[in-house]
Image (cartoon, rainbow, N blue to C red):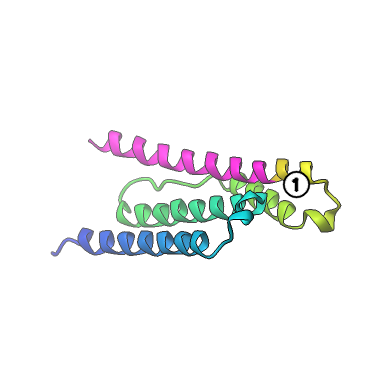
Amino acid sequence: MPDSRPNSRRWTVIASALLCCGLGVVVLYTKRSAFFSPLAVVVVAAIGLAAVLLQLRYYNREHSNSTPVQAPVWLNVLGVGFALAALFADFLGLSWQMAQVVALGAVGSFSISSAMILHAFRKHRTSSK
């Protein structure tokens, strides 16, 4: 029976390369002044979270015989809510200070969620040895 690990590894590398290209396009075609916007920080954090969630999907597919690693859904929903509030801050009547706090909340929840997933990967790797 042939081993499917190289094939799944290939798709992980391809998906990672596409996400890196997407982040590169965002950085290359954005004016320098736009990076002072809290929304730009939220977009970059969301791309990073998408990369971790894609890695989670491939990790669970590759390790289907063990307990799957679960993403903290409530934290991701909270981050998406913060991101939408930062996106529509003008329509919601938020001050610019509050919009920055909301954007920081989105980035914080995305990064904590990613850290929890990556910690679970490391924990599964050490327990399987």
Q: Residues within 10 Å of mark 1 (few under 14, many from 20)?
A: many
Q: Is residue 51 above or below residue 22?
A: above
Q: Position of residue 39 (x, y in %)?
A: 66, 53
Q: Residue at x 26, y 63 (%)?
A: 10
Q: Is residue 63 above or below residue 15?
A: above
Q: Residue at x 33, y 64 (%)?
A: 14
Q: Residue at x 26, y 38 (%)?
A: 128
Residue situated furthest front in the rendering: 32
Q: Which residue is mark 1?
A: 99
For residue 123, side relative to residue 75 (left or right): left
Q: Is residue 128 magenta?
A: yes
- Residue 103 or 29: which is nearer the viewer? 29
For residue 44, side relative to residue 15 (left or right): right
Q: Position of residue 47 (x, y in %)?
A: 51, 56
- Residue 64 or 92: which is nearer the viewer? 92
Q: Position of residue 115 (x, y in %)?
A: 47, 39
Q: Is residue 1 magenta?
A: no
Query: As shown in the figure, which amino acid type bears the numbered disc 1?
Result: Ala
Magenta span: helix, strand or loop, mainly?
Answer: helix
Question: What is the quadrant of residue 108 in the picture?
Answer: top right
- Residue 3 or 76: which is nearer the viewer? 76
Residue situated furthest right in the rendering: 93
Range of the magenta residues?
103-129
For residue 80, side relative to residue 57 (left or right): right
Q: Residue at x 41, y 63 (%)?
A: 21
| Quarter of the figure with the N terminus | bottom left
Q: How many marks?
A: 1
| Quarter of the figure with the C terminus | top left
Q: In the structure shown, which secondary structural element does the residue marked by tag 1 occupy?
A: helix
Q: Position of residue 71 (x, y in %)?
A: 50, 47
- Residue 111 or 72: which is nearer the viewer? 111
